[in-house]
Structure formats: structure tokens, C-alpha cells
Image (tube, helix red, strand yellow):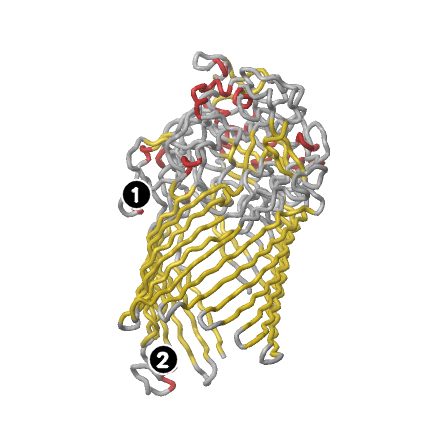
Amino acid sequence: MRTPSAVAYTTSVPTDAMRQGIFTGLTNGSGGGVGAPVTIYDPSTNSPNAACPSSQANCFRQPFPNNVIPQNRFDPVAQKLMTFWPEPNCQGCITNPALQTNNWKTQGVANNPVNQLDTRIDHYFSEKFRMFARGSNQSGVSTDFNAFGNAGTPSGSGPTNYYNRNVTANAIYSLSPTMILNFNYGFARDVSFHTAFSQGTTPSSLGFPAAINGVVDNFEFPQISVSGNSSSYALGQASYTSLKDIPYSHIVRGDLTKVLSKHTLKTGATFEKLFVNFTQYGSPDGQYSFGSGYTQQNTSLGTSSSLGNAFATFLLGLPSNNGSDLQYTFSAATASAYAGAYFQDDWKVSRKLTVNLGVRYDVDIPRTERYNRLSYFNITAPSPLQGMVQSSATCPNCGNLKGAMEFVGTPGAAYGRHQTPTDLHNWAPRIGFAYNVFNKTVIRGAYGILYAPSMLQAAGTSGTSGTEGFTGGTALNTSLDSGQTFIASLSNPFPSGLIRPLGAAQGPISGTLTDIGGGVQDSYFIDYVNPMIQQWNFNIQQQVKGDWIIQAGYLGSKGQHLPDGESSINFNQLPASDLSLGSNLVAQVANPFYGIIQNPTSIYAKPTVQANYLLAAYPQYSGVSAFRKPIANSNYQSAILSAEHRYRNGLSLLIGYTASKLLDDASQVVNYIGQAGTKQDTYCRKCEKSVSSQDVPQRLVVSPNFELPFGRGRKYFNSIPRPADFVLGGWQMNGILTFQKGIPIAISNGGNSTGLNSPGIRPTDNGQNPARSGAIADRLNEYFVQTVFTQTPNYTFGNVGRFLPNVRQPGVHNLDFSLFKNFHPIEKMNLQFRAEAFNFTNSPTWAAPGTNVAAPSTFGIVTSASGNRSVQLALKLIY
């Protein structure tokens, strides 16, 4: 199969004036218009001022004369990186003239050829024994479109070479006329190699220190993101592009069925062994983000929509990110096992009543790694630093330090080669019934518990596998005092050196001291049980005249221990009561760990440190987080109506309507596959409960299929000659009409901090309803009432929920239509011509409005639409 696809790509690139450091006349484009003037301040001019708090005495900066940055101040790496952005080429594409947003456009082709071979063999040994075997092989090379045509392109990622192979064997043996044994074996193996467009690009070729060449895992373009009082600019393929993924599994299953007079008994068991060989580079050559904060006037205040500019900060080479910004990994080889057994009884109590009773038991054996390269954080263990530091007013927990990294397969490991105990409590009962109340009326109901696969199955090194000590990174700390002084830059991002992971061997920053002075991430397993879902339903089904079946029902479910991948939960967050400390939270205080914590890139590597780190429960760590662990909850309630017209006189029709509500406190397992909310307070889980990002309150789908009643064998013209039937007969029309409400919107604060080391901060509303009614085309520049929301300042929590219950993204109204014509050149052959139109009415699908309250040029504004009509023609031969 060959499926080339056209790609149109529009983005923002810096203007010629910006590339020269000229920001004279710059405005923020608020409301899609001119907006307010933006002033650029020189970060090298920090000095005392009456506006500065005592915690940041040198917080005040002076503006660049005429808003122009002298070119001799440009960072040399920034100058080199600028050459990878093309020149603006599309004045007609611009959506915000003040910011020159979307001023570049191109188009090209992406290819995804697929070769697939499927085979199957069936053999009938006897009346009692038969079996089949099936095999499949799929391979291909998909190639993205390189929009910039160079190594720095942010559009597309690179070619993927892959093949997938699987084999299945099934045997069925009749032990008796009422007893059947079914045995199944399956094997599957997938191989995928994804290579970045920029493969081979060395850091030194971009102007970074040559020493970085010798320590990175792979040579590719770094990720560059620029956003703040500007259009958003990007370079480099996304993180986690380069990938070698080879999962394979063996599955054995047996089922036994026994039929009695009123009972059908079923029992069976499954065993699965899963293996994963995995290498994925996160940001092997670094990720560098630039905001407006370092070029605004006052370092002690939150971000401003009229002070500072992200691209100006980029030219000066001052990244604003803090984290594991140059990442290291290894090639993992993990394995896990699953076993399950079940028993079910379908009991026909009477002619009208059938009851289904069953129970299932599941066990997931946690993963192991071939060379024991797995870790787990013990939050209650005494710290190796215990006794080296005394408690004080600035560090109340220093006298009782807790927390140590532990490793599987080492002497004294709590769980042997595993990171957690095995969850042995996964009993899943279920019950259901069907009752024929009247001749054509049936009611049904059911309740059951289901367990999802464990988060501790075989996995790679990305996300939550718990490989700290073997994976990690070197943090880029541009400033340790909120921008009053700078210790690193783009051209010298890691002046204290680069720290590679050292494994389980005990050392100053390895073994039990892994992550000391930094942040604990995916190796903290706050919970390990399987995700559990309770489901229940009830419906009434009625058959009426004219071959119609009408159904009304209710469906509910409750999820517990669901994976939470929206954002990390920091157990080093300070309590909300500490908000009263205000800017004192970020004041520099004496560092009791100076000289004790020996990580040279740590925030503890200088005599002073921010006060909020020392006030935490685990002050020897900058953070203690649990990411993508089974701690989320959900609740779903829905009413379902449907009407089905069974095939008669050439017509079949299905109408389905669902009204529902989905609530949760985390909506995503991974936040790049869907909209994710921002958490605020680790200690208030109920405060995170809101409508889910996946909540669709109403959905209506109408699916008609109609064979036109013309031609031979039809109601009209049923005896016309074959040549006439060749034209008039065999026509069929099909359609799928969909109306669906949009998913909720999450409003972003666009900067600022609580100072508590909390997961995030949300905006504040004034209590009024921000929803606006009317056609979307009439409110593109004010999709909702923007003035309801304001940016929450530092040192406080916002009052907006994770997702808004009363403002949603544009919904869906779509008609897919097809027309078929069947030709019968000979009796046993059908040649079918198919004309299929997707989005037949060519209705626009409006993009979501901007949701960053600190970006007035896009906030509440719908800037684009998609959904062009697509038509495909095909011939299908059936014989």
C-alpha cells in the first residue's frame, strides 16, 4: 500500500529586524491588534531600587536604548542557530501583524509505504479436532516532510523503518458433545527504528563547547523554544525522536466450556511473557527554552505582557529552563509476566430470565531488567546525609533527613529484582442479567470490576520505568537568584561540568545518594497496584413495528488507581500556609548543605540557596516527584438512546445519542497525546477534580445505508434489459452524520510561581460566566469573555479549575457520504465502484482558541480552521 500525503505547514519565523536586535516599536499584539508597547530591559544592569524586596535587593534593570540590542551582545550560539530559520515568505498568512505570527509557509509530501503479507492454514483432523495457524508480516519506511529543509526543522521528525511479525496457532478439541477445549498460542514481535532528520549534528558544529561532543549519547539538533511577548519560534525535532523499540511477547491461553441443561460453564487461564528492548534519546544534545522574564524590568515580579521579549532573551543567550536539560539514557532490556484465570456461569433461570455470574483473577509480575538497571526511591529510609546537618529555623527538617535511592538485585534489596511488591489482590467479580419482560421488551443490567494492565509491565526508559541512577541529565541553571546574576549561558550552558549517571555503585552522587541535590522523578513508586475500573449499566430494549428496535440505557463507571501522566506531583511542596511568606520563599539564605552535597551542577553547590528548598520535607532534594503512577480517579455517567432500523426494502438506519459527563483529577497518561490540565496543590487532590479533558457532554450519530430501488431485482424497473440495468441498477448511498459538543478548555496562567515548589499555578477568574453564545465565525476574536480571567500573581493559588465546565472547544458537525455502484459482469463476480467524500459539506473544523492568559495576542482568539472536503475513488472486486 502506498499512501503519500500532502503536508502544508505554517509557522512563525523571526523578522529581519528581530534578527538584528531591533525591537523599536515592538507591541504585544493584544487582542489580535497593535496592543501595548513592549520594552526590552538589559539583564546585565541589575541594581538596587525601592521597588525591590529585601529578598531580591538587585532586582531592577535598565532598558536597552531605543529597544535595540547591540549585536556585540549577541550570544555566538544564538547567532549560529538563527541561520536555521528561513526568511518570512507569506505576508498573506499573518494572523497577528504586530507580532508577525504565521509569516512563513511551505508544503510538501510525506510518504508511508506499507508492505503486508498475511497467510492462514486450516486443517480438519476429525469431527472432534481442528486447528488453524495464521501468520502476518508488515514492513515499511515512513518519511516525514522536512519543512525547513535543514537539520533544524521543527516540523516532522525523520524516517522510521519498521516491521511487525506475528504468529497464532489455535486448536479446538471436542471432549464430548457438551464439552469443548480451546487452546491458543500467539507470538508477536515489532521492530521500529526512528532516526532524527538532524542525525549527526554535533554540538560543536552549532557553537557549543566541544567538550559536550564527548559526553552526549547521540548527535542531533537540540530543542529550541522561544515564547513570551512574541510569536512562538522553534528549532529542532521534538524530544524523544530517536528511537529503537523492539517489543515481543508470547501468549498461551486455554479455555474449557461445558454445556448443561440450564448452565453454560466456562473456565480458562492465560499466561503472557512480555519482553522490551528499548533505546530512546530524550534530549541528548540539550533543550533550551527562552521566555521574557530575563529581559523584563523587575526580576521580583511575575511575567508581564508589556515587559521583556523571549526572542530578545534568546539573542542574549539566557535560557530560562531549569531541569535535566541534557539527558542521558541506556539501552534497556526488560521483561515481565502476566497470569490470569476466570470462571463464568451463564445460567438460564427460566425462559424469560438469564443470569451471568463470573469471577476473574489477574496477577502482573513486576518487570525485571537483564542487568538490574532499575531503581526505586525509599521515602522513609534514613538519608545517607542524616546527622551531617542540624535542624534550624531556615531548615526545620535538616536534623531528620529521610529518603534514599535503592536498586534492584543488590544485597538487601526489598523486592529482589523487582521495584515493588506484586499486587495479589486483583479479584474481579461480575454479574449480569437479561429479562424478557414482555414479548418484545427486554431489560438488561450488569456490574463488574475490571483491572487494567499494571504500570510495572516491561517498559523502556522513558516516562515511569524507574531507571534513575542509570538515566538522568545535567541541569541548566542559568541563574540561581531569579535573574539577578547569571552563571550560565547558551554558549556555556554547563560551566560546572556534565554529570553522567553512575549507577548503583556508592559514591558522592550515586548509589543511595543518586539525585542528591536534584530532583527524584520516576523512581518514586507512591503506588503500584493495578488500575481498577468498576462498571455498571442498565438498559431497556423494545422492538416496534416496521423492523425498528428502540433502546434506552444508562452506563456508569468509576476508575481508581489510574495512571496520572498530566504532571509530576511534588511531595517536596510546601503547605499552602507558607504562601504568607511571599517573596521570602525565594530569598537567598545560608546553605547548610554547601560542601556536603557534592553535585557541582546542583542548586546546593553555592553558599546560599533559595529558602523554599530548605523549608521542604526533604530539603536535601530540590524535588521528590511521582510521575505517571496509578494515583488518579475518574467518574463517568451517561444516558444512551438508540434507534435501529434493520435492513428492509434496501434501507438500514442507526441513530445513536449519548448524553454524558466525565469527571477526573487527571485526564492523560502522557500529555502529548491529548489536552492535559495543570495541577496546583499536591496536598489537595480534590481540588484537581474537574470535568475531564475528554468529556463530551452530547453526541449524536446518524448512519443510513440505502440501496436505491431501481434495476433488476428491485422495486422499480425490475425487468429492464441488462444494458439498462448496467446504468440504472446497483446504486447504494451511505452516510455518517455526526454532531458532537466540544471538549473542555484549560486556561493557562502563562508564568509566575506560588513559591511553594507546587506542580503549577492556574489563573484567577472574577466569578462571572465567560461563555459566549452565537456562531463561532462571529466570535473568532472573542471566543469567550477574556476579561473574566487574569494572570495569578506570584505566591498565591488561582481559583480556576483544571478545565472549564462552561467553555468548550468548537464541536464537530460533519457528514461523510459515499456512493457505491455494483456491477455484475458475471454471476459470481461483483465489481464495486466507490466514491467517498469525507466532510461532504466542506464544513470548517475550528481550532481551539488561545488559552494562555498571559498571551493577549492569542488569548480567547480562534486563529485557524481545518476540515477541507476530501474525496477518494476506488474499485473493489468481490468474487
How many numbered badges does the structure rendering display?
A: 2
Where residue 661 is drawn, which disc sits there?
none
- Judging depth in this view, the residue of 743 and 848 nearest the camera is 743
Q: Position of residue 590 (x, y in %)?
A: 58, 15
- Residue at 67% across, 31% down: 512
- Judging depth in this view, the residue of 242 and 340 nearest the camera is 340
Residue pointed to by mark 1: 779
SS at badge 2: loop
Q: Amino acid at mark 1?
A: Arg
Density class for disc 1 (Cα within 10 Å; few <14, some 14-19, many ≥20) is some
Tell which circle, 2 or 1, labels the residue nearer the N-terminal end: 2
> On the image, which quarter does residue 613 sit in?
top right
The reply to whether residue 20 is in sight is yes
On the rendered structure, is 450 left or right of 37? right
Q: Position of residue 118 (x, y in %)?
A: 59, 69
The reply to whether residue 495 is in sight is no
Density class for disc 2 (Cα within 10 Å; few <14, some 14-19, many ≥20) is many
Q: Amino acid at mark 2?
A: Gly
- Residue at 44% across, 22% down: 301
- Residue at 58% across, 61% down: 269
- Judging depth in this view, the residue of 642 and 433 nearest the camera is 433
> On the image, which quarter does residue 771 sit in?
top left
Residue pointed to by mark 2: 729
